[in-house]
Image (cartoon, rainbow, N blue to C red):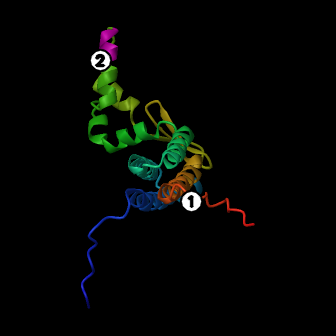
Amino acid sequence: MEPEKVLNELPPPENLALGQAWLWTKAAMVPAERLLNGPSSGLPDALLLLVALRNVHRAATMALRHMRNPNARKHLADAVAQFDKALPGLVQARDVVEHFDEYVLGDGNIQRRLRREAASNRNDLSEAELAELYAPRLRGTGSHPLISIGPHTIDVTRAPDASTWLLSRIYSAADIEQRKPSDPPPSISPRRS
């Protein structure tokens, strides 16, 4: 048995991002399916879904950072904006989940800012009040679950389509990025005389 050959150079970053987006999209499907169709473990599935969705978003922004083709960049930037519109507050909600060790104590970044703002208005917010404010909750109905953290609510019914849609946009942006400027778009073929 021969040892595996080690590559001397990495594939293009947009391809690496695409691979990660695919993995995290698949990872998002499992808890989304359980939340939507059961059997679900409830809040644990909701937390896993937030992490997976956020990583699909991170893969898209990773690809975007490395793209040089203005058409590819615009295509993907528009897609990320649409994803953010479909799942508003996702990034902030996932941050609370990821930094639970601060938020359960009422000492997360957002909570510290809220405490300063309240103090400047001569109001006091305790750590317990701030922790309660940012405690993750699963609410809604069995067919329409919602994940709420602080002022952010993520509609679980949108998650599967939003993540697969963003994955497809990363793929098409990577295709645009790798095309030569003189290449016609794939859907347009040159006329032959």
Badge 1: residue crowd in 10 Å (few <14, some 14–19, many ≥20): few
Q: Which of the two labelled residues, at mark 1 and mark 2, occupies the earlier sequence position?
A: 2
Is 142 above or below relative to 190?
Answer: above
- 115 versus 175 height, above or below: above
The residue tagged 1 is: 183
Q: Which mark is residue 92?
A: none
Q: Which residue is mark 2?
A: 116
Front residue of 174 and 39: 174
Left or right: 168 in relation to 13: right
Residue at the limit of the structure toward the front, as seen here:
193
Residue 73 in the image: x percent, y percent?
48, 46
- 2 or 191, which is in the foreground? 191
Measured from the top left, where is residue 80 in percent x and y?
A: 50, 44
Secondary structure under tag 1 reads loop
Residue span colored magenta:
116-121
| SS category of the residue bearing label 2 | helix
Q: Quadrant of residue 115?
A: top left
Residue 153 in sight in this render: yes
* Secondary structure, magenta segment, majority class: helix
Q: Quadrant of the N terminus?
A: bottom left
Q: Is residue 81 magenta?
A: no
Q: How many marks?
A: 2
Q: Is residue 82 above or below residue 14?
A: above
Res 124 → quadrant: top left
**Distance between mark 1 and mark 2 Cα atoms:** 55 Å
Residue ID at (33%, 12%): 123
Q: Is residue 138 left or right of residue 121?
A: right
Q: Quadrant of the C terminus?
A: bottom right
Residue 114 lies left or right of residue 185; in this view the side is left
